[in-house]
Image: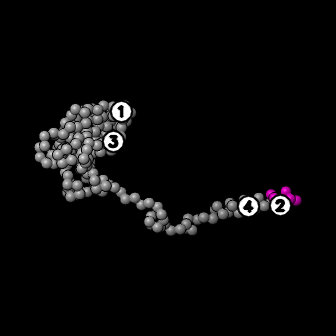
């Protein structure tokens, strides 16, 4: 008798649990609350779309536009870095400028670079040209240079299926706008 009662209690408990699991229809869920009230973090997007004039007003910098560049798109990141995206001869490029006190990598590219060329120039600025050539993925190239006169860090990067014939220094020369005349 005790065994039958125990089995009955277990079955009754299982029945209660199964019915409770199925009784939470979507209509009974609390209405969505704004992030501030629900305790969730509502992080602002650091990227703001703008135009060339907006970048000049926000950061006081400008990009040179390469001859033949198409589909230009401008943005700022955290109001401290200017970005220009464009395509040139079928290759997508990203150029960036950031007021800075020192040389730093602002490209946003984090690769184990297969080739680095430190002894190059963009305008009168010392530059680094780096590439990552892959047999299975897109190729990646980046050029970094620092204009010490106004304290501006530049980067230019490109990603594409075959960048072997691309001269990123030639494109970087067209992006570079000496901010305070010829400091060299």
- The answer to whether residue 141 of the structure is visible from this angle is yes
SS label for mark 1: loop
Q: Is residue 2 magenta?
A: yes
Q: Which residue is depicted at the point 25% across and 40% down?
A: 144
Q: Spot the residue most to the left.
A: 182
Give residue 64's position: percent from left, percent from top.
18, 47
Residue tagged 1: 134
Residue tagged 4: 13
Q: Earlier in the sequence, mark 3 or mark 2?
A: 2
> Alpha-carbon neighbours of circle 1 within 10 Å: few (<14), some, or many (≥20)?
few
Residue tagged 3: 109
Marks 3 and 1, how far apart in space? 15 Å
State the image quarter where residue 111 is shown: top left
Q: Which residue is depicted at the point 28% across and 43% down?
A: 104
Q: Are marks 1 and 4 in contact (CB under 8 Å)?
A: no
Marks 1 and 2, how far apart in space? 70 Å
Give residue 69's position: percent from left, percent from top.
21, 45
Q: Are marks 3 and 1 in contact (CB under 8 Å)?
A: no
- The answer to whether residue 89 of the structure is visible from this angle is no
Q: Are marks 3 and 4 in contact (CB under 8 Å)?
A: no
State the image quarter where residue 139 is shown: top left
Magenta part of the protein: which range?
A: 1-7
Residue tagged 2: 5
């Amino acid at each position: 008798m005790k065994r039958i009662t125990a089995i009955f209690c277990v079955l009754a408990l299982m029945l209660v649990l199964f019915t409770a699991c199925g009784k939470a229809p979507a209509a009974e869920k609390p209405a969505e609350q704004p992030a501030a009230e629900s305790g969730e973090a509502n992080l602002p997007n650091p990227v703001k779309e703008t135009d060339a004039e907006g970048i000049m007003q926000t950061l006081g910098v400008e990009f040179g536009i390469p001859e033949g560049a198409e589909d230009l798109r401008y943005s700022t990141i955290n109001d401290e870095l200017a970005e220009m995206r464009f395509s040139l001869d079928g290759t997508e490029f990203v150029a960036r400028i950031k007021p800075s006190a020192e040389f730093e990598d602002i490209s946003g590219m984090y690769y184990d670079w297969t080739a680095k060329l430190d002894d190059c120039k963009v305008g009168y600025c010392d530059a680094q040209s780096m590439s990552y050539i892959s047999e299975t993925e897109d190729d990646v190239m980046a050029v970094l240079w620092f204009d010490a006169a106004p304290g501006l860090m530049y980067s230019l990067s490109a990603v594409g299926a075959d960048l072997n014939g691309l001269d990123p220094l030639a494109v970087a020369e067209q992006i570079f706008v000496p901010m305070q005349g010829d400091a060299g």
